[in-house]
Image (spheres, rainbow, N blue to C red):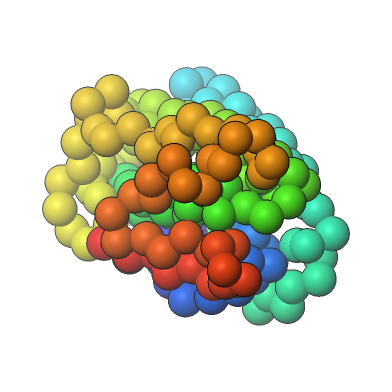
Amino acid sequence: MEALRLIKTARHALAEARHVPDVLAEARQAALLTEAVGARLADLDDDELTGLGQQLSEAGAHAAVCLDRSVVRAALVSGGRVGRLTELGDLGPALGALDGLLRDVGETLVVLACGADTESLYWTCIDGVDAVSDCKDLAGRLREAACRSGAGEVTALGGARAERADRGSPLLVVRLGPPGEGGPKEEAQAPPGHRVPGAAGASEVSVPTG
């Protein structure tokens, strides 16, 4: 299956996840997919794309490790998604879609951190945000490199032309402390359109797909 189709599937699955363990599991699946795409890019006959692809693969693997907690292993995820990757396909659209997926993952992890009931969940989310931010930066650099090399027009998910990586919207960063340190839930504000899980026993999150 082409990378673009898999990335779209992963983005949809993340948006549809409702319970915290499922959201974390889908975030980890996205990280593993990022690692796999990077590994494929590392095999291309282009020095710049090869080097950045290797870095993306390593960053994706690191993000997956950050999100590999017991709460993730307890979730049932539609398995084998990464194993279905057979080819990169059109590089520009695939990298544009990957950028959108990583943005969604980062914003979702911020939401979970805002509503975390335990320090373990909080630090899992914060570590994941940092790792996914590194992946997103590399994906943006790869999009520009692909455009320079003529590997394909850099196009965002949905057909609109993507902004340059250094001019796009950065990942939202919410500075807050772990549970028990001065009531971060009351002070932290989730991004518009997000519902914070964890408060009043809630264990769900909904994330916009646009």
Q: Residue furthest left?
A: 160
- Residue 146, percent from left and from top: 35, 33
Residue drawn 64% across the image and 60% down it: 24
Q: Quick check: 46 left or right of 161? A: right
- Residue 81, percent from left and from top: 63, 69
Residue drawn 47% across the image and 47% down it: 186
User: Measured along the vertical axis of the image, is residue 10 above or below residue 107?
Assistant: below
Nearer to us in this view, 38 or 127 = 127
Nearer to us in this view, 94 or 191 = 191
Nearer to us in this view, 96 or 127 = 127
Q: Quadrant of the rendered structure where residue 192 is?
A: bottom left
- Residue 147, percent from left and from top: 27, 32
Residue drawn 65% across the image and 34% down it: 181
Q: Quadrant of the rendered structure where residue 53 is?
A: top right
Nearer to us in this view, 163 or 71 = 71
Q: Quick check: 20 left or right of 110? A: right
User: Measured along the vertical axis of the image, is residue 159 above or below residue 42?
Assistant: below
Residue 88 visible in this rendered orientation of the protein: no
Residue 143 visible in this rendered orientation of the protein: yes
- Residue 178, percent from left and from top: 66, 38
Residue drawn 63% across the image and 66% down it: 20
Q: Residue furthest front?
A: 182
> In which quadrant is the C terminus drawn?
bottom left
**Total of numbered circles in the picture?**
0
